[in-house]
Amino acid sequence: MTSTDDRIATEAAPARDGLSDRVAHLQNAMHRLGADVIRLQTQLSELAAAPEPAPEDDDGGATPFIFNMSRDAYKTELAALVTWVDDFLVPVYVGSGEDSRTAQGGGAAPWCPMWWEHHEAVGRLHALRLAYEELADTRTSGPSGPGVWHRDHLDPALERLRSPAGPFAACSATTGHRGSRTRSQPA
């Protein structure tokens, strides 16, 4: 090597070191970007695999009252209500129907076997079920929740439905549903 080559090599050395530092810095940045891409791909895969969350309504996800639903939602909710009433409420709290008239002094109307034909009954029983869903879980309503449901919701609803002026007044557990009461009778 000549002295000129030595001089160029020594002058280029700092330049190569600066260039090497910049290349190393860019390589480090590329590795960080690669790691970020892998992290984001993993998050995207997890989100794609996760079940889609249920859409929340403006009211915090609460079930709307049955009379405020669309026709299709009403039919679905009514089917769920029929199941709840027939499989839980009637066997546990209502009984067979006619036997309650004598047990309660003859004043209470029997349970209508076609209760869903009475709009008042549908509304009251849906409200009763909504209250049950809220108050039966002692983790959220506290230990007195079920008692509150019985006292404040179940007893008044059954008294109204089976009262002599209630929606089941014209019905019989043995002969069945007889339509709704006339409009002239007080509610």
Image (spheres, rainbow, N blue to C red):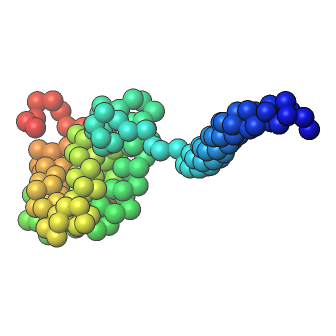
Q: Is the N terminus in the top left, top right, bottom left or bottom right quadrant?
A: top right
Horizontal and vertical percent position of residue 19: 70, 35
Side of 43 relative to 169 (left or right): right
153 or 9: nearer the eye? 9
Q: Is residue 143 visible?
A: yes
Circle count: 0
Residue 116 placement (x, y as % from top left): 34, 44
Q: Is residue 82 left or right of residue 97?
A: right
Residue 33 seen from this side: no
Q: Residue at x 69, y 37 (%)?
A: 14
Q: Residue at x 39, y 43 (%)?
A: 77
Q: Residue at x 28, y 56 (%)?
A: 133
Image position of 105 (left or right of 64)? left
User: From this viewpoint, which residue is outermost toward the front?
Assistant: 3
| Residue 103: quarter of image | bottom left
Q: Is residue 126 left or right of residue 77?
A: left
Between residues 88 and 53, which one lies in front from this camera angle? 53
Q: From the top left corner, tell me how far across and down residue 21 is, in percent.
A: 65, 40
Quadrant housing the C terminus: top left
Question: In the picture, residue 47 is in which quadrant?
Answer: top right
